Amino acid sequence: MNKHIKKALLNGRLVLLLGAGASAACKNSQKEDPPLGWNLAQILADEIGNELEEDDDLSDLYAAAKRNLGFQVQNIFDKYYKHCTPSDEYRVLAKYPLFRIYTLNIDDGFERACYAIDGKKFNVRRRHDPISDPDQFYQTLDLIKLNGDVNSPSDGYIFSSQEYAEGSANEPLWYGELARDYHRYTFIFIGTKLKEPLFKHQVEKYKAKTGSSDLKSYILIPSLSKNKKDALGASNIHHLEGTLKDFTDWLELEFNTPPTGSDIVRNTHPELSLASLESDPSRMSLFSGLIPVNRSSLALLERKGRKSQIREFYKGFKASWFDVMDEVPAFLYEVSKYFETTLKDGASKALDLHLLFGSAGSGKSTALKQIALKLADEGERNVYFIEEHKDNFKELISELDDRNSQPYYLVIERVGDVAIQLSEIIKSSSLDFS
């Protein structure tokens, strides 16, 4: 894998979407692997007494089975997908503090892996369930079953073309949330080639409505054709050769013990991370006006704070984080050129100071927010934004230095307010300043 994925995990910005290949090593009640698409199609064809032909696919056979067998189809699903023994890979994956995992699978293998871990908190969400906010302390996993759940047959399944069409018309709530998550987190698609019409429909609909760009994400399967790689690359989805086992092997190699939700909180919310703050609440003032920049937490802040359907930006106010994430103000050429040539891919050195000059109303604040979000989207370093005057700026820097083992970015909206303290920090630093 790579350090971008590791950083996303440690910063609570990694989301998985599991396809049929991810459950392949589980064992069902028949002591067999849960059947994948073509094998399930063969089983359904045998049950209805039809021959499986070369141009048939699972959606065809499922539609035919529903028509001929009715509720007996559920008995088939119970036989092959219920009471699964989880794979070793699922047992490893369940130990990590992922706050959301989407799955296209209907089996219960991953849930049973979670049940086997003492104290593991998780919720099973189904596609029409109400949307719940992510656990901001990374203690609880939401497992979202998009295409159905063998343990909840009344919710139905999505296999046939008709059901995909109905899903597009009815817009399942969690498919809409999946599209939003895709544009604010780092995704890894495991065991699927992403031939999912509902997913694509929701993603494109969200992009058309908001103007959002695709963040860098990954698809983990053993092989892909060059044309498929190019097509996915257009959506900034990068192919990693391998399986879920390769991913869990990498996790165990990278971490002697799995990180905890508390570890993620320490990385993402510095104001909550040290016990010393509990014994000295006055130290909380250090973090007043400091915003950890990443799409997930910013989206949550905007969801709670937004009241009007008309953006304040259109009324003449400066751009909010909500506006910047939705790319309402344009990412101007000169700002984009500056980012690409000077900051992209960690190009800046430690203690680099970059200043933006311009008259009032020229767009400096908007440009700073856009740059901060671009840096955060790269996922390599933590990014913080200060938007108020701070008398204790030097103490804040000292705290951030203690809490970040790697270089980080600090974006200051009104640098003149802290200019004297900033010069003192530079003078006292043992690093060469440029």
Image (cartoon, helix red, strand yellow):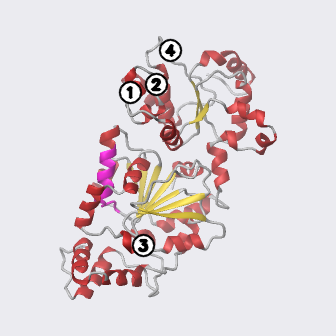
Q: Earlier in the sequence, mark 1 or mark 2?
A: 1
Residue, disc 2: 366
Residue, disc 1: 329
Mark carried by residue 110: none
CA distance separating discs 3 and 1? 44 Å
Disc 1 is placed on an element classified as loop
The magenta-colored residue range is: 193-206
Q: Earlier in the sequence, mark 2 or mark 4?
A: 4
CA distance separating discs 3 and 2? 47 Å
Disc 2 is placed on an element classified as helix
Mark carried by residue 357: 4
Q: Quadrant of residue 410?
A: top right
Residue type for callout 1: Pro
Residue type for callout 3: Ser
CA distance separating discs 4 and 1? 19 Å
Q: Which of marks 4 and 3 is nearer the N terminus?
A: 3
Tell me which residue sits at (43%, 15%) in the image: 362
- Select label 4 or label 3 by which is in front: 3
Q: Where is residue 297 in the image (x, y as percent from the top left)?
A: 54, 42
Tell me which residue sits at (61%, 36%) in the image: 408
Do we see residue 206 in this rendering? yes
